[in-house]
Image (cartoon, rainbow, N blue to C red):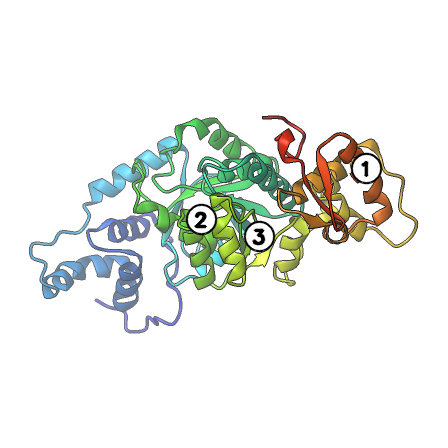
Amino acid sequence: MRDNSYSSTHPPLPPTTEDVRVSWLRLLRSRRVGISTFWRLLSEHGSAQNALDALPDVARSAGVQRYEVCPEGVVHAELKAGRMRGAQLICHGDPNYPADLAELSDAPPMLWVVGDPAALTRPMVALVGARNASSLGLRMARSLSGGLGAAGYQVVSGLARGIDTAAHVEAVDHGTIAVMAGGVDVLYPSENTRLAEEIVTKGGALISEQPMGLQPTARHFPMRNRIVSGLSRAVVVVEAAAKSGSLITARCALDQGREVLAVPGHPMDARASGCNILIRDGARLVRNTEDILEALPPSEPAQQAEFPGFEDSIPPGDILRSLPEGPPPRRSLRETANLHLQILQQLGPSPVAEDQLIRDLGVGSGDVSPVLTDLELEGRVQRQPGGLLSLTPERNTDPDGTRH
């Protein structure tokens, strides 16, 4: 019997007994019951068991004959598979259920988690991009991911090849969240099996809303992407084609009211077209970690002071801006090498004015000029008329100096 005191204006209480958890999972796994239908049935009937009892009549009134709800045996088999994998089932309303994700109208009622559930309670930023990422894109992903991790944010991504993998690898020591398109026990792609294990052992987590053992198909990835953005305070796109899963994630983020940021790329590089489109349409342009931190809600400042290694993870220009006023310290060899790298990352085949480069780096011209001279002498940067600078194309080198 329906509890007439139940109010649909408040989220339902999470399951407090194993029987209620089984009822929730049976309802969620029943045929033709999606996320929206689950929440509507729970709201209308007051409990998952009441909804299960009413579901055959609801289906019959919708023209579906001989409807059967998900058998208990199927759910018990899934729960057993979860225990064997060492996974935990976290329900909407549980203390470890991600608060930002819970705000969504289509929030998953239940999540399978392998790893540390407490990782889901920390502030998160999503970092996504192309599977066939460029060398520069991978380096940018690693730089941003390491900076975010050091600043106290969990980096969220999809464990895919390319940008996702680079983001997870760099953030793994700080804790990172991998959202799976299939079951949490189905590692895809298989070459990231070792990475997934490292994520779990180092305080991160693998999560999925799908049943244990489910092999991912094309339709599962957009569903996964809404969780990637829903977990996060902001979504950063590093490289993405004009039609790509990363842009689906960005659209989900916009619909969810999240901040969308993108790393610009060369107009003739197809892998950068999606990012350039996002920036054209109003996404915040990202040059470094500080650009991301500035875009995050001011009520949740990054805890940089707790991570003494943060200075090594962000561009030298950002470090100088964060220092107290006074005479700048003498540059170490490591800082000089970092400045070399940042200059080469800023430059590309299109010429850039030297004063614009200096403004982008946030470093004094007296520090940049001798480094530019070194790079010119090495043949890695060339000057063009009008005080413009670009990478030397005939050398065909990566920004870290590695030749193809």
Q: CA distance from mark 3 to mark 2?
A: 21 Å
Q: Disc 2 vs disc 1: Cβ atoms closer than 8 Å?
A: no
Instruction: Say which amino acid is labelled 2.
Output: Ser
Instruction: Say which amino acid is labelled 3.
Output: Pro
Please give the label number shown on residue 246. Answer: 2
User: Which is more toward the observer, 291 or 205?
Assistant: 291
User: Which is more toward the observer, 277 or 333?
Assistant: 277
Is the C terminus in the top left, top right, bottom left or bottom right quadrant?
top right
Locate residue 4 relative to residue 55 in the image: left or right: right
Residue 56: percent from the left, percent from the top? 13, 58
Q: Residue at x 44, y 47 (%)?
A: 241
Locate residue 252 relative to residue 373 in the image: left or right: left
Q: Residue at x 67, y 57 (%)?
A: 301
User: Which is more toward the observer, 39 or 318?
Assistant: 318
Please give the label number shown on residue 123. Answer: 3
Please give the label number shown on residue 373. Answer: 1
Tell me if I can see residue 128 in this picture: no
The single residue placed furthest to the left in the displayed view is: 65
Is the N terminus in the top left, top right, bottom left or bottom right quadrant?
bottom left
Q: Residue at x 75, y 51 (%)?
A: 386
The single residue placed furthest to the right in the displayed view is: 327
How many other residues sit within 10 Å of disc 3, few (<14), some (14-19) or many (≥20)? some
How many other residues sit within 10 Å of disc 2, few (<14), some (14-19) or many (≥20)? many
SS under mark 3: loop
Residue 161: percent from the left, percent from the top? 45, 35
Q: CA distance from mark 1 to mark 3?
A: 42 Å
How many other residues sit within 10 Å of disc 1, few (<14), some (14-19) or many (≥20)? few
Q: Residue at x 44, y 48 (%)?
A: 246
Locate residue 345 relative to residue 58 in the image: left or right: right
User: Which is more toward the observer, 14 or 122?
Assistant: 122
